[in-house]
Amino acid sequence: MLTVLFVDGDKTFREQLRGLFDCDSGFETCVEARNGAEALAKSFRGSLHLAVLDFSLTDMGAIELAHKLKAILPELPIFVMTTDYNVSIEKKVLASGISAVFSKHDDLTTLVANARAVCGIE
């Protein structure tokens, strides 16, 4: 069973992601967290196969959270979503070991396709 963790303070956006991942995406469980602390607490409960983080979390930055998640689950692929996508943010995020960065304004089916690819879902 493949599990994806969504970390975003916006409940509506988390629900939108859940809808995309629930529709025959190959992921069977979606876990939601409003912030970094909640994400870390939920990461200890079970096996995660992918994390999708908001770049602008209220309690810690996405890069800091990514490092903490990687300390718990070193092989975990992590994607970052941002509303202010630019090359500078992309370089900073990718240099920190995060798998990919996406704009929240783009077609989110691309996010799902990339999630399937990094998790080996055909």
Image (tube, rainbow, N blue to C red):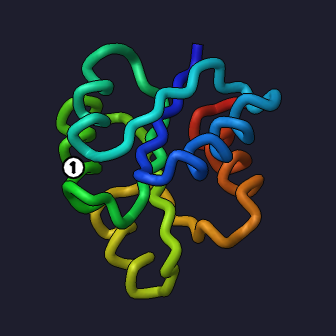
x and y percentages locating residue 42 in the rendered image: 31, 25
70 on left or right of 103: left
Of helix, strand and loop, which one carries label 1? Answer: helix
- Image quadrant of residue 30? top right
Q: Which residue is mark 1?
A: 67
66 on left or right of 13: left
Q: Residue furthest right?
A: 24
28 shown above or below 102: above
Write the residue at 24% across / 34% down: 40
Write the residue at 50% across / 62% down: 81
4 shown above or below 13: above
88 on left or right of 1: left
Write the residue at 20% across / 55% down: 59
Write the residue at 40% across / 18% down: 47
- Image quadrant of residue 43? top left
62 shown above or below 78: below
| Between 10 and 63, the one nearer to me in the picture | 10
Residue 122 in view (yes/no): no
Residue type marked 1: His
x and y percentages locating residue 28 in the rendered image: 65, 19
The C terminus is located in which quarter?
A: top right
Residue 93 in view (yes/no): yes
Label total for image? 1
x and y percentages locating residue 64 in the rendered image: 20, 56
Crowding at mark 1 (Cα within 10 Å: few <14, some 14-19, many 20+): some
The N terminus is located in which quarter?
A: top right
x and y percentages locating residue 48 in the rendered image: 43, 25
| Between 116 and 7, the one nearer to me in the picture | 7
